[in-house]
Image (cartoon, rainbow, N blue to C red):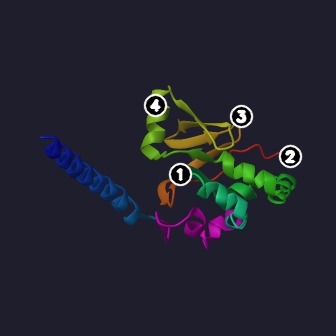
Amino acid sequence: MHLKNIVTLVLLSVVFSTATAQKYASKSDSEVTTKWNETTFSSKKTISDNIKGIPSFSILNEILKDKAITNLLASEEMVTVFLPTDEAFEALPNKHKKELLGNSKRLSKLIQFVAIPGRLDYNSLITAIEKNRGTAYFSTLAGERVGARMKDGSVILYDGERNIATVTAFDFYHKNGFFHIMNGLVFPVRPE
């Protein structure tokens, strides 16, 4: 009887271990691709690799050449990032734009400010907004809160200084999470 219990326990362990291993193996081996304009984004690529060479992300591409910044994003198991297009940076007053782009610490803080730990797809955003009476708040990697609300059918993000950005495209995968595209900066851009 004792031997029968041991054999049963070993068989159950093998079956469970195999099922668990297959579950995780199938996730990492599958690739999800999504299109934006003429570009195909892939869940097997980093954010940097996904946006490399896209003209509307030329400024962000330069920022992401900083290894400390890319390592910050890579160190997160699952992270959702709101990517500002060049339009967002070009809208800044020249003085603030120059100060921001010339300061690696502030750029690192910017990336942390637009990154939210975990998986936050379009449906999760909308659900959070609806459940919280029209405004949802999310904690960022910078330890700050960013707000989200609906306005005229669009998702609007805002920070504590009333900077706003419209999220123009949703649900693109990268190696360790999601990214969305926005046309503004939700980040205190004035020098500290």
Quadrant of residue 21 in the image? bottom left
| N-terminal label among 3 and 2 | 3
Residue under label 4: 130
| N-terminal label among 1 and 2 | 1
Residue under label 1: 77
- Quote the CA–CA distance across marks 3 and 4: 21 Å
Q: Amino acid at mark 3?
A: Gly
Furthest-bottom residue in this view: 53
Residue under label 3: 160
Quadrant of residue 86 in the image? bottom right
Observer-side mark, 1 or 2, equals: 1
| N-terminal label among 1 and 3 | 1
From the viewer's perspective, is 25 left or right of 66?
Answer: left
What residue appears at the point 50 percent right and 27 percent down from the top-left corner?
Answer: 132
The residue segment tinted magenta is 36-60
Task: Confirm whether residue 185 shows in the render.
Answer: no
